[in-house]
């Protein structure tokens, strides 16, 4: 084992926990040093390539995440188990391009709730198992996800067709991309609607902050409502237009979940009246 790569890896993990103000520069310096070690033949065994891959996984550009994936594959080739680091590295590379994820072990913040992005429909659970990542259902329930920090199970509620678990992460994921999108239309009151590559839509308030968002989740039995800030949470059953819904309230944010023929809708916002208005429109189109 290369001792310097191990030391660089330990420094990377320390910075991930402590989040120093100059973390990005420190990450960049480590990647430069790791590249030199790799290029000069300093990595010889599987764990060396794993240490290097994790450091590059905390990069800033597509080439960093692709390099992490290639290093992870090399480690697997040399016999490293489990294989999930390679799957996570590939998904991070895809995520940063707005493409469907191959395996699904990544999240994006959406109105303060962390969501699983669109998944490649051609990936089977057998393939996920081969690469040591959770099954399709487990991903959406946040069960057995790889590489995440500690989290707490806060609360749960179930109605006749859906179960929602509130999950509180120890801290926000350090390398999760921010929400970005393009203009795709306007509301009846002339507010701009934004949409990201995964079809999630939202509107912003006058200050440019997230105000109301809606997205469609595939049909799964359990959904994890994932948050990463301190606050008070509550969950309750509500009925809207004949639909059985589950309402999650976390601090000032409210999320309404309900199932339709197309999938499970999740609407998140600050104003419950705006949420229900949008929900009624969606429900009328689903009837």
Image: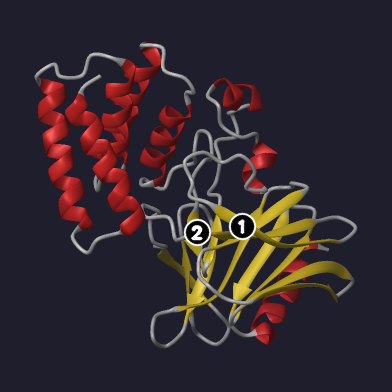
Res 4 label: none
Apparent side of residue 43 relative to residue 202 in the rendered image (left or right): left
- In the image, residue 209 sits, relative to residue 201, either above or below, namely below
Instruction: Let me know if residue 47 appears in the view.
Output: yes
Viewer-proximal residue, 15 or 185? 15
Quadrant of the drawing holding the C terminus: bottom right
> Looking at the image, which residue is at 39% across and 41% down?
92
Q: Pointer 2: what residue?
A: 170
- In the image, residue 149 sits, relative to residue 187, either above or below, namely above
Q: Pointer 1: what residue?
A: 152
Q: Are marks 2 and 1 in contact (CB under 8 Å)?
A: yes
| Helix, strand or loop at mark 2 | loop
Classed neighbour count for the residue bearing mark 2: other residues with Cα under 10 Å, few (<14), some (14–19), many (≥20): some
> Looking at the image, which residue is at 71% across and 58% down?
165
Viewer-proximal residue, 238 or 218? 238
Classify residue 286 by image quadrant.
Answer: bottom right
* Mark earlier in primary sequence (2, 1): 1
Q: Residue furthest top?
A: 78
> Looking at the image, which residue is at 62% across and 47% down?
142
**Could you give the CA–CA distance between mark 2 and mark 1, rounded to whole angstroms?**
8 Å
Apparent side of residue 119 relative to residue 175 in the rendered image (left or right): right
Instruction: Let me know if residue 63 appears in the view.
Output: no
| Helix, strand or loop at mark 1 | strand
Apparent side of residue 264 relative to residue 269 in the rendered image (left or right): right
- In the image, residue 242 sits, relative to residue 10, either above or below, namely below
Q: Position of residue 8 (x, y in %)?
A: 21, 37
């Amino acid at each position: 084992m290369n001792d310097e790569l191990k030391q660089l890896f330990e420094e990377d993990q320390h910075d991930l926990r402590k989040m120093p103000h100059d973390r990005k520069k420190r990450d960049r310096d480590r990647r430069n040093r790791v590249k030199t070690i790799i290029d000069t033949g300093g990595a010889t065994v599987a764990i060396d390539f794993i240490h290097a891959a994790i450091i590059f996984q905390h990069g800033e550009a597509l080439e960093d995440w692709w390099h992490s994936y290639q290093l992870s594959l090399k480690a697997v080739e040399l016999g490293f188990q489990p294989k999930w680091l390679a799957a996570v590295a590939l998904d991070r590379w895809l995520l940063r391009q707005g493409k469907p994820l191959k395996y699904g072990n990544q999240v994006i913040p959406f109105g303060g709730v962390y969501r699983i992005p669109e998944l490649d429909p051609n990936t089977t659970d057998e393939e996920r198992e081969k690469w040591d990542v959770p099954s399709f259902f487990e991903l959406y329930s946040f069960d057995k996800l790889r590489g995440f920090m500690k989290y707490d199970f806060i609360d749960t509620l179930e109605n006749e067709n859906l179960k929602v678990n509130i999950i509180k992460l120890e801290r926000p994921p350090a390398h999760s991309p921010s929400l970005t999108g393009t203009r795709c239309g306007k509301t009846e009151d002339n507010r701009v609607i934004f949409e990201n590559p995964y079809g999630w839509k939202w509107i912003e308030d006058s200050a440019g902050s997230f105000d109301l968002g809606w997205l469609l989740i595939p049909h799964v039995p359990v959904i994890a409502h994932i948050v990463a800030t301190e606050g008070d949470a509550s969950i309750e059953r509500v009925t809207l237009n004949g639909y059985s819904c589950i309402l999650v309230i976390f601090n000032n944010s409210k999320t309404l979940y309900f199932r339709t023929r197309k999938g499970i809708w999740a609407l998140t916002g600050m104003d419950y009246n705006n949420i229900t208005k949008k929900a009624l429109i969606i429900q009328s189109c689903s009837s």
